[in-house]
Amino acid sequence: MPYERLVQVGRVAYIAYGPEKGKICCITNIVDQTRVLVDGPSSHVRRQALNIKALHLTKYVLKFLPGARSKTVKALWDKHDINKKWQESRWYKKLQAKHTRSQMTDFDRYKLLHAKQAYNRIVNHEYNRLKKKSKAELAKKTKKTKPRTFVAKSKRIANKFKIFAAPAAAGKKK
């Protein structure tokens, strides 16, 4: 199924624009293809018809019949702790962070910049320290016990073909 969040009775929605912008409400009835009747007694949204384009659907759904009274919607809203679930969601936290950033002054942005720089400096220092430590440990493990001797190319060829090789028995003295 391509869509998981359908416009349906009981669907909790976020009002994206208009006079009630930033509040959440519940769809209580569908008027036509473009408008729905919403109610949000616990979020202070009065019962009204809103354009579907002004709503962003959330994952929360309440089970009640179409055209339910505000009292019924409020009871189910409070029973399911919709306000608490909404405030714990990532969506709400992102909206709060966006609002907080928009309220920042120039000096606040300056302080944030320097705090981020200090944090990144600490993280990079620790990362480089651990990287250096692991590199040293790896070098210890791979260190060869017998050091390699470097031999000239001409000497290697001579040894390979036994050119200028001394006789084994003749070279010993007693």
Image (tube, grey):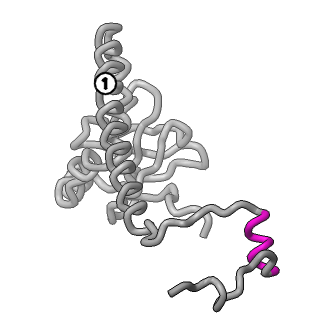
Spot occupied by residue 135 in the image (x, y as percentages of width and height): 41, 55
Q: Residue at x 36, y 19 (%)?
A: 113
Give the residue furthest to the bottom. Answer: 169
Locate residue 148: give its quadrant.
Answer: bottom right
Is 160 magenta? The answer is yes
Question: Which element is circle 1 on?
Answer: helix
Q: Residue furthest top?
A: 106
For image coordinates 57% across by 48% down, the residue present is: 32
Instruction: Kindly report the secondary structure that dominates the magenta region of the rendered protein.
Output: helix
Above or below, 100 against 84 in this view is above
Residue appearing at x 59%, y 44% in the figure:
34
Mark 1, residues whose alpha carbon is within 10 Å: few (<14), some, or many (≥20)? few
Please tell me in which quadrant of the rendered image residue 143 appears.
bottom left
In the foreground, 64 or 133: 133
- Could you tell whether 79 is left or right of 1 in the image? left
Mark 1 sits on what residue?
Answer: 100
Residues 153 and 93: in front is 153
Q: Is residue 85 above or below residue 162?
A: above
Give the residue at x 31% y 24%: 100
Asked if residue 142 lies left or right of residue 82, the reply is right
The answer to whether residue 26 is above or below residue 17 is: below
Query: Quarter of the image containing the N terminus?
Result: bottom right
Residue 35 falls inside the magenta stretch: no
Task: Tell how many labels.
Answer: 1
Q: Which residues are magenta?
A: 154-161
Question: In this rendering, would 69 be left or right of 173?
Answer: left
Query: Amino acid under label 1?
Result: Thr
Q: Nearer the viewer, residue 134 or 140?
A: 140
Q: Nearer the viewer, residue 170 or 111?
A: 170
Residue found at the very far front of the displayed protein: 174
